[in-house]
Image (cartoon, rainbow, N blue to C red):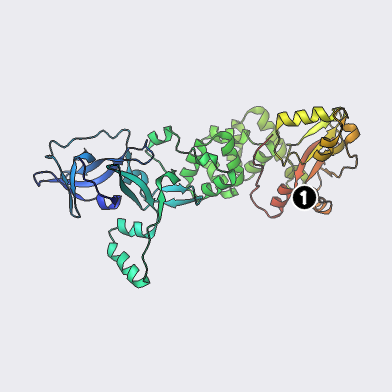
Amino acid sequence: MAAIVPEIHASRLLEKTVIDNRGQRVGRVVELYVRPDEELPPLVALEVQAQSGRRRTIAWSAVQVLVREYLSLSTSAEEAPEVPVTSLLPVRRALFDKQIVDLHGLKVVRVNDVKFSEIAGQLRLVAVDVGLRGLLRRLGLRPLVIWLENRLRRAVPDTLIKWQDVEHIDVEGMGQLRLGVPYARLAKLRPADLADIVEALNARARSALLDALEEDVAAEVLTEVGPDVRASILAHLEREKASDLLESLPADEAADILSELRQDRAEELLNAMEAEEAQEVRKILEYDENTAWRLMSTELLCFLDTQTAQETIETLRRLQPDPEVAYYLYVVDEGRKLLGIVSLRDLVIAAPERPLGEIMNRHVIAVHKDDGREKVRDLLAKYDLLALPVLDEEGRLVGVVSLPDAVDDLFARPRRRRGGRG
């Protein structure tokens, strides 16, 4: 039966001397192992290193006495039960100084210590300490904590995050953890929140996180981070993974991202993309950066003037487009020439059998594909528009500039794109 204490920090167990039931020195504790597949992982083993350098993994259940100076086993050193560690999590290697995500604070922090508490007769990992007190305790500087508390005339608090409220990010060498669902709760966050977390991680951890997320979620996060972070991510991701993310984005967004990269890396990723998607992106990259061509999105809703209001509504229900895409419905002829525009309000109140050609507003404010970005922004502001259609030389509809994208461009921010797509 293991020695039970109400609570203890990992730093108080590590480096502690271990003696057997005859008082003979077995070694010192160099690692702690917990079982990670439980909500609050129990402490199940100690890795003990003898003076000879030999290491053994002894079951925590063999510990009988725990005092300040040492741990005492209930058996002789030779009889102490050993534990295989293949499926166990080494606390020092896997957690100390590692980056984790505080899901409540939506931020990245670094682990300084780990707290165990006695629950139903077992010591279980209940929290990680990310504060100054935990760091000083771990470094053996408890007298400094006392000095600080006397100097500040207040206690230096433990900064604890409950184990259930963190997700592991830096898991190098802990491959078995990545076979489960370590990113499940992270994947439920909004892409903008995930982007803030990704930007706080190191390069390897960023790639690990994106690699573990669903492809569409990872692609959304990629559009939300800053250009420097985005370039770093694409530099570290495998070529196939990076090209897959770009393929899942609209061509204009993929072009924006590739234009930020070194030319050789951009060309490498383009060559790895499917031929059709790559061709569309290459076409956009040829556009003048100062024109509506490069500001517009090719994601829009257009319908033939002969379609009825009822048919259009049924199509919208099937597509479930993102609200940003559904600001306006554009009415075109068979040659995609822009004829007019229909608001969602006019569509809903129209008789079901009426064709869009009878509902649409023919007085459409639009820009030419070669018009400058300043003209685009001026028209959006002057007429209080949420989006502006972009036409080619023949009057054909080729894209649309939304107000959010124009504002992002004005302030030279990373392009905060849509939260989903229709």
Instruction: Choose between 391 and 10: the one closer to the eye.
Output: 10
Other-residue count near label 1 (Cα within 10 Å), few / some / many at <14 / 14–19 / ≥20: many
How far across and how far down the image is residue 54, in percent?
Answer: 18, 40
Q: Is residue 146 left or right of residue 175?
A: left
How far across and how far down the image is residue 248, in percent?
Answer: 62, 33
The amino acid type, in three-letter code, at marker 1 is Arg
How far across and how far down the image is residue 168, in percent?
Answer: 43, 43
Callout count: 1
Asked whether residue 391 appears in the rendered view, the answer is no
Above or below, comparing residue 128 to residue 276 in the picture: below
Q: Secondary structure at mark 1?
A: helix
Q: Residue at the location (51% across, 41% down)?
A: 186
Asked whether residue 266 appears in the rendered view, the answer is yes
Residue pushed farthest left? 22
How far across and how far down the image is residue 306, in percent?
Answer: 87, 27
Check the picture and name the quadrant holding the C terminus. Answer: top right
Image quadrant in which you'd find residue 191: top right
Q: Is residue 265 left or right of residue 407?
A: left
Q: Which residue is mark 1?
A: 373
Instruction: Choose between 7 and 87: the one closer to the eye.
Output: 7
Image quadrant in which you'd find residue 61: top left
Check the picture and name the quadrant holding the N terminus. Answer: top left
Instruction: Choose between 201 and 372: the one closer to the eye.
Output: 201
